[in-house]
């Protein structure tokens, strides 16, 4: 059974950078390391590089089709709710064990709230949202091969490492996963998996 999994990372930006983008008349873009493979995170989980790299490859389709949207705060759901969308991911790539990303804030109600927050100097973080199982190994959990990356949401830094545990443990049925991924997405994931296996030989 898959569970909803969320992970938090700080975004590195300054009010001066935000002000410069506003003055230039461009949409506000934030970028930085948004996830890390093979490293123990604050939720006591490790994402194996092979699994995370696969999911980043699969996520490229969402970026190419302008469907890589995220919400302001994690919902208690695996479904992206368009009325809460605050940003769109413009780039997500792996460099070594690090996942780098660039997002653009939208002029949606939630996006405008995010804009006001960053313009006011509030530090936001970015958090991956996905579904998958974990396997206990010693003091930590390793994310399983069934992991599916859904999106990256904007969040505020939790005061404790367990601050997002309320979203954990929600069971995700196979029918819910079919709502997240269209048939063409599922086919694309299979083709990406075949291509990566051939490349590994």
Image: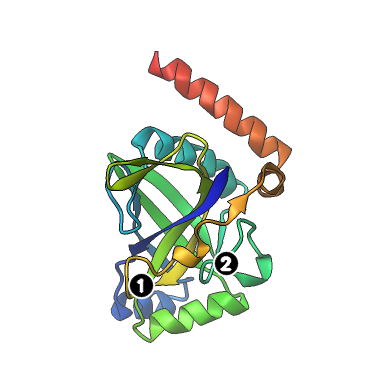
Residue 19 % position (x, y): 36, 81
Residue 125 % position (x, y): 38, 68
Of residue 191 and residue 157, the one placed in the foreground of this image is 157
Q: Residue furthest top?
A: 201
Q: Residue, x 47% and y 34% (percent of image)?
A: 145
- Residue 128 position by quadrant: bottom left
- Residue 78 position by quadrant: bottom right
- What separation in Å lies between label 2 and label 1 (alpha carbons)? 16 Å
Q: Considering the image in quadrants, where does the N terminus appear?
A: top right
Mark 1 neighbour density, 10 Å: few (under 14) some (14–19) many (20 or more): some
Along the horizontal axis of the image, is 183 left or right of 107?
Answer: right
Along the horizontal axis of the image, is 78 left or right of 72?
Answer: right
Residue 15 % position (x, y): 32, 80
Residue 155 drawn above or below residue 129: below
* Count of numbered labels shown in the rendering: 2
Q: Residue, x 32% and y 71% (percent of image)?
A: 160
Residue 127 % position (x, y): 43, 61
Residue 15 drawn above or below residue 90: below
Dot 2 falls on a residue whose secondary structure is loop
Q: Considering the image in quadrants, where does the C terminus appear?
A: top left
Residue 120 drawn above or below residue 3: below
Q: Is residue 88 visible?
A: yes
Q: Residue, x 27% and y 39% (percent of image)?
A: 96
Residue 158 drawn above or below residue 136: below
Q: Which mark is residue 183?
A: none
Dot 1 falls on a residue whose secondary structure is loop
Q: Which residue is mark 2?
A: 75
Q: Which residue is mark 1?
A: 157
- Say which label, 2 or 1, has the lower sequence index: 2
Of residue 23 and residue 99, the one placed in the foreground of this image is 99
């Amino acid at each position: 059974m898959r569970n909803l999994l969320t992970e938090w990372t700080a975004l590195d930006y300054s009010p001066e950078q935000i002000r410069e983008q506003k003055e230039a008349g461009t949409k506000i873009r934030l970028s930085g390391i948004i996830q890390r493979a093979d490293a123990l995170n604050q939720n006591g989980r490790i994402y194996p590089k092979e699994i995370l790299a696969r999911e980043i490859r699969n996520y490229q389709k969402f970026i190419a089709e302008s469907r890589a949207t995220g919400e302001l705060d994690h919902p208690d759901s695996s479904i992206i709710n368009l009325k809460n969308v605050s940003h769109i991911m413009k780039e997500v790539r792996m460099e070594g064990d690090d996942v780098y990303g660039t997002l653009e804030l939208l002029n949606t109600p939630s996006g405008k709230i995010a804009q006001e927050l960053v313009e006011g100097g509030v530090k936001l973080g970015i958090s991956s949202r996905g579904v998958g199982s974990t396997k206990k190994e010693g003091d930590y959990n390793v994310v399983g091969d069934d992991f599916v990356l859904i999106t990256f949401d904007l969040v505020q830094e939790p005061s404790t490492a367990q601050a997002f545990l309320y979203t954990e443990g929600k069971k995700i049925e196979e029918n819910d996963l079919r709502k997240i991924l269209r048939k063409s997405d599922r086919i694309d994931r299979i083709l990406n998996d075949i291509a990566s296996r051939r490349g590994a030989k």
